[in-house]
Structures are given as structure tokens and as C-alpha cells.
Image (spheres, grey):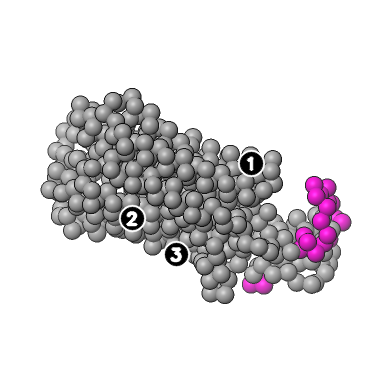
Amino acid sequence: MTITIKKDLHLTTKDVSNSNILALTATLIVRFFCGPACDRWGPRKVFAGTLLLGAIPTALAGTVTTVRGLLVLRFFVGILGGVFVPCQVWCTGFFDKNVVGSANALAGGWGNAGGGITYFVMPAIFDSLVHKQHMTPHKAWRVAFIVPFILITSTAISMLLLCDDTPAGKWSDRHLAVQQNLTAHHVSQVVDVPGTITGERPVATEALEEGDVKLKLDSKANGSFNCEVELAEDEMVSIARGEVILSPTWQEALPVVFSLQSLALMAAYFCSFGGELAINSILGAYYLKNFPHLGQTGSGRWAAMFGLLNVITRPMGGFVGDIIYKYTRSLWAKKTWIHFVGIVTGLFLVAIGLKDPHHQPTMIGLIAGMAFFHEAGNGANFALVPHVHPFANGILSGLTGAAGNFGGIIFAIIFRYNGVHYAKVFWIIGLIHIGVNVAVCWIRPIPKGQIGGR
């Protein structure tokens, strides 16, 4: 509904660009803080809370009458973009490292596809209100925003009422799944909530204490599983120590923030998700510029393809990453997959920018090819994230997610200062993709000597 809102509020192209940049900035800030919040309070509560906060400005969209009001509104609606971080942290907590890439990518892909779905749903609601309810366009686009408010609010409330924090139940009991695995393998040490291993031996009783929660089980009574790989007791204890998420402190957070591994993941996601955000915001206008006969609805629908492909492409990125890991057991291979799709994406972007297609099938084909690798890069990235600094998964997920939005801001600024010269910006972004991925491809996938994460 960009054209309708732009006309109603007398917006310039720069006003629209500024509103996009403000929304991305808000998402960046929220993602940065959501990461540590997930580690402290659990991703479910952070997820639902962020949805409810973002639902309020969504409901107030109809009150906007000025450019300044739109800019303020877009900033606060941008809060909703922060839910990606608790989504990924939540998925990581429920799935094994062998399949976590597929799980994260599937959840993220459906989330990204929501951006494509809005290209269809919101104009359809608007058209229905205008043609069937006989509302004026001035009123119809404002009423249309009540629909996402209802969907967002109901989703958040359902999460709070129906979902668990972890496979073990409460967030304070997140260590129990690790403890049960140790006990099943006759490892008689106790994992406490902060994620440290005590030297205490369990007794044949089960005791749960609030605050300093410890699980004490008789391993013989609970049976055992056959290990695929024989590990010494100390090795299993070390792995368990590294897998339990800690409540964040500066002592744990700073090494994560400044590690080269975090930088590599952030740089790749800066390009993949950042580029996707920026392209999504202008693709409808690009189609309309090169193919005026499509009109607002037609160009919007073809632009929606880019977002909707996330249903397939982002999960494919995570799925391929998991398959690579399954057969190679190498995190280097997983990381190489990230940079491969990043560089191929760059080549597609350069091709689109240099050709600037005015032949519709050519344009659609190049955009679809670019989307496959571009969006697969997002899934590939968060297939590796759970392996890196697993005790601070929320912090790293927040940093990586925020880097994606930072990329969106930078690329949106480039689009803003090039006006309707969209093709030029495409090849500029393509060169950035190639350069950044080559620059960080040498960094080890996980820090040397890291405990857990494999």
C-alpha cells in the first residue's frame, strides 16, 4: 500500500526511505538487547513481550496524519523485527546440533515469508474495504492495520498460555535435559542452573530446589543409552558445561562480542539479511519503474515473490548446512557453505545491476535466482550460530540479528541517495557481498579450545 499511503500523507521518496531506515534502526536496537534478555529470562517471554510491544504502534497506524507522525510510528513498529532473535534462540534450545540448522532456517524462513505475504494480504484487505465496504482510500488503509494488530496480539497471548520455555519446561530448569543425558550415560555429576558442573555425587532421590536448582537421579533406575561415540566421563562433563546457557554477565559477554567468530557471522548476515531487507523495500518500485503496465498491485505481487520464496530458500540454506555437517562432521564445511552462497548472491546482484532488465521474464528469472542464494545465506548462517559460543547463544544470536539490520540500514541509505537508479545500487551491493564474504572466509568457525558446540 506504499503508493496509497504516500499519496495520502504527501510523502516524498526520501520520506519513504527515511521511514524504512528508522524502522530498521529500531529493529537493530531491539535485537541487540533481546539477545542477553533471552539468556536471562528465556526466549518465550522475550518473544511474547516483544510482540505485544510492537502490536501497540501497529494498532495506532490509523492515527498518523503527518510525515513526522509516520516516522515515529515506523520506528516503534520496527520493534516487531526484534522477535527474530528469541525465535532462533527458542528453536536452538529444542533441537540437536545435527538438525538445528534446518529448524532455525524453517522458522526464520516462515518469518521472512511474512514480508512477502503482506504484499498480497494488506492490498487485498485495502481493496476489500474500498470496493465492498465503500470506504475512502484515506480511511481504508488505516482500518486495514487492525488486522495485523489482532494477529500479533493473539499469537503473543497463545505463546504465553500454551508453550514451554525449554524441553524440560521452565527456563530455570533448562539444565535438566543436559543432566538427564549425563545421568543416562552413568555420569554422576550435577549440572546447576548457572551452567557450572559441581563435583557432588547424586543420591537415589529426586530433588528440585528453587534458586540453586540441582537434579539428583539414580542413573541405574533411569536406564542408559548406547553412545554413538565413546567419551570419557570428564569429556562428557566438559561438553555439558559448555552447552548450558548462562545468565549473561560482562565477564561472559565481552569475549563473545569481540571474538573473530562473532565478527564472521555478523559480517555474513550483514550482507545476506541486510541486503534482503533493503531490496524488499524497493523491489516493488523497481518492478513498477521497469514495467509500468504492472501497476501498484501487479508490481507488488511480483515483488512479493522475493519474500515468499523464503518458505523454500531459507530452510534450504539450513538444511544443506545440516547435510554437509552430517557427512563431513566439519564446521569448516558449514562455514564454507555460508560464504559460497554469499559470493554467488553477489554475482547475481552484479548481473541484475549491470543488465537492468526491461524484459520481464529475464528480470523475474534473475531476481528468483538471486533470491535462492540470498535467502539461503540467512538459513546457512543460523545453522552455524548454535555451534559458536553455545553458553551465550542469546547474545550471539542478538549480535548476528542486529548486524543483519545494520546491513539493511546501510543498504537502504545507499538506495536513498541513488533515488530511482535501482540498478546501480544492485551492483554496488553485489560487490559488497563478494568483498565481505571473501574478507572473513579465513576465520575459524569456532574459537580454538571452545567447550561444546560440536
Q: Earlier in the sequence, mark 2 or mark 3?
A: 3
> Residue 443: percent from the left, percent from the top?
57, 57
Boundaries of the magenta span? 211-237
Instruction: Return the residue at label 3.
Output: 33
Tag 1, which secondary structure? helix
Instruction: Return the residue at label 1.
Output: 324
> Residue 246: percent from the left, percent from the top?
60, 67
Identify the image quadrant of the C terminus. bottom right
> Residue 94: percent from the left, percent from the top?
61, 50
Query: Is residue 352 covered in magenta?
Result: no
Asked if disc 2 and disc 3 are in contact, CB closer than 8 Å, the reply is no
Please determine whether, in this image, residue 124 is positioned above or below residue 164.
Answer: above
Please determine whether, in this image, residue 440 is positioned above or below residue 39.
Answer: above
> Residue 306: percent from the left, percent from the top?
38, 36
The majority secondary structure of the magenta stretch comes to: loop
Tag 3, which secondary structure? helix
Give the residue type at disc 1: Ile
Q: Earlier in the sequence, mark 2 or mark 1?
A: 1
Question: Residue placed at 38% from the left, 62% from the top?
Answer: 29
